[in-house]
Image (spheres, rainbow, N blue to C red):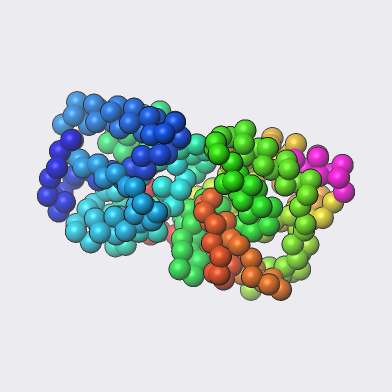
Amino acid sequence: MFLLNLTEENMLDFIANPMAGGKNGKKMHSVLAKLESRLKERNVEYTIHITHQLKQSRTKTEELIKNGATTIIAVGGDGTIHEVLNGFCEFDKCTLGIIPCGTGNDFASAIGLPTDPVEALDVILDGTPKYTDFMQMPGVRGLNIIGTGIDVDVLKRYNSLKKKTKFGYTWSLIKTLLNFKYIEFDAVIDGKTEHYRSFIAGIANGTRYGGGIKLCPDANASDNYLDFVAVKEMGLFRIIKAFTKLKKGNILNMKETTHKKMKSVKIITDSPVTVNVDGELYDGIPFEVEIVSNTLRIYR
């Protein structure tokens, strides 16, 4: 690999999570070898930064941009992208690229990136970055989906599994659906307040999570809107039907589902809740989300 001055123009900085995609790092090793082969073939200057500690991708991104990096490329899954986004600064000087090679790759799928890492690299080498919406909370940014309720319970079950797979996420969802307690909250959406007793308070910029579970197929990360989704209380038979529709991407068609396009939302609950931001769990942060448009540029 080339190790060059980080202030040199047109050099690509890759931030790679070695454990993305599982298989004890074997998948990432294979992906990086393919990427380096294509980069050398096309005579592109680059540096690969391997992260090993929690939030190291975040601090490395900020450090690189402050030292003049112009293109940061996240190599990994939704968690890696989330960390890189939260390290971004000086948005006018730096663009974001994505090489999807995690377990789910949900946001990459939502914006239409190729699943093949070399093809995803070619999108960056040959394409033009486009403005892409993201979600701003107090102290943290989200790119894909932010929520509380059933998705938090599912993630807690999933995170307890020794082996992280798409099937494991689906099984965690089924077990949670059969044992879940509804949450009550007020949602202040663009200044208007409504009360809900729901499975979830979900804010979508991307369309899916959990490796393909389509919470909001109508979401569009470049339409300057976020999507609010809540699913009201229902009986066991309807829960089974809701699960089927969720898997097929039809949950918005159920009468119990509320779906609204909006710019900002504040979720108010009687007690603090854990918030799922792009698959990462946060405690102690206010559930307040607003859209940020025409700021972040992503190759897609």
Quadrant in which the C terminus appears? top left
Quadrant in which the N terminus appears? top left
Q: Is residue 114 above or below residue 298?
A: above
Q: Tell me if residue 138 can be seen.
A: yes
Choose top left, top right, bottom left or bottom right for residue 166: top right
| Lateral position of residue 259 relative to residue 226, left or right | right
Choose top left, top right, bottom left or bottom right for residue 169: top right
Q: Residue at x 54, y 61 (%)?
A: 282
Query: Does the stretch in magenta take in 125?
Result: no
Q: Is residue 260 above or below residue 251?
A: below
Q: Is residue 167 above or below residue 210?
A: above
In front: 71, or 179? 179
* Image mark count: 0
The magenta span reads 235-243
Q: Residue at x 71, y 73 (%)?
A: 270
Q: Where is residue 162 in the image (x, y as percent from the top left)?
A: 55, 39
Choose top left, top right, bottom left or bottom right for residue 174: top right
Q: Position of residue 95 (x, y in %)?
A: 31, 51
Q: Which residue is drawn at 45% across and 68% down?
A: 139
Query: Does the stretch in magenta take in 237?
Result: yes
Q: Is the magenta stretch mostly helix, strand or loop?
A: helix
| Lateral position of residue 112 relative to residue 245, left or right | left
